[in-house]
Image (cartoon, grey):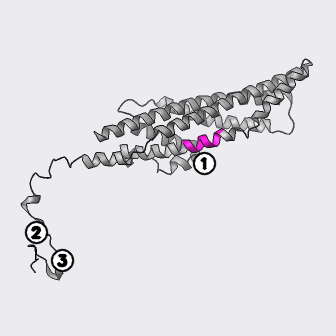
Amino acid sequence: MDDPHGGSTSEGGKFDGSRFRDSRFEGSRFEGSRFEGTRTAGTGARQHRALSGLGVAASILIVLVLVYDVLHAVSDWQVYNAVEDVLAGTATDSQIQAADDFGRYFDGLQELVFLIPAGVVFLVWLWRARANAESLGGPGSQRRARGWAVFSWITPVANLWIPYQVVTDIWKAGTPRRPVPGPLLAVWWGAWVIGGYVGRAYTYEVTRDTFSEDDLRRAVYLGTVFVVLNVLAGVLIVYAIRQISVWQTQRSAEALR
């Protein structure tokens, strides 16, 4: 059956597309032109989600948590020294009152004011960075599905190594063809995991109904070790946030050229 526009249809009225077999659509008009490659770069650029603002916000909140932790450790030492002086009979009323007043700001609940916002903003940043990493490096560059960027942190057992894999894969996908400083992320993760266990031991010590001078001393030492590990992990993840944000922004800008 002839088509009124010059093509033809096969039996059953199905169009065979022959009228498009035209010299106008063949040859070099669409080959090797500006249309090739443009869509690929444009797709990557459209999929890129800005990280700089979130990265700065997450870094500031993490630093606030670290400052709180350091002050908490100072408070613990003040209380310990006051108790030592009381036992030695050399403590003054003002010294005991000062240690008690300062310690009231660090009962553990106040930290949530900084810790919860820091965790939420960091996870939003990590989710976006994971999406960008897949766009830059391809799905094969990421060992874990995107959901693990958030849920791996709260999944028992999995939270011992999967978050590290997620961050490492994001780092590798964004790094501009230079050696990946593996020890940096390894030290970050080691400090984070070990610090978590030390923190649990510290919590156990300070929540006893009764404890001796030795128990108090042990708790103060554990708290100090926890803070040192936490500060180390915090500083390294802030550095990683900055590097990943910068690299992904640069890679996205290059894709637009």
Residue indicated by mark 2:
19
Asked whether the beta carbons under mark 2 and mark 1 sit within 8 Å of each other, the answer is no
The mark lying in front, picked from 2 and 3, is: 2
Residue at image coords 68%, 34%? 198
Separation of marks 3 and 1 at Cα, in angstroms: 56 Å
Residue indicated by mark 1:
154
Mark 1 is surrounded, within 10 Å at the Cα level, by few (under 14), some (14 to 19) or many (20 or more) other residues, namely: few
The answer, for residue 161, to whether it is visible in the render is no
The mark lying in front, picked from 2 and 1, is: 2
The mark lying in front, picked from 3 and 1, is: 3
Q: Earlier in the sequence, mark 2 or mark 1?
A: 2
User: Which region is colored magenta?
Assistant: 114-121
Residue 255 shown left or right of residue 113 in the figure:
left
- The main secondary structure of the magenta stretch is helix
Separation of marks 2 and 1 at Cα, in angstroms: 60 Å
x%, y% of residue 167? 49, 40
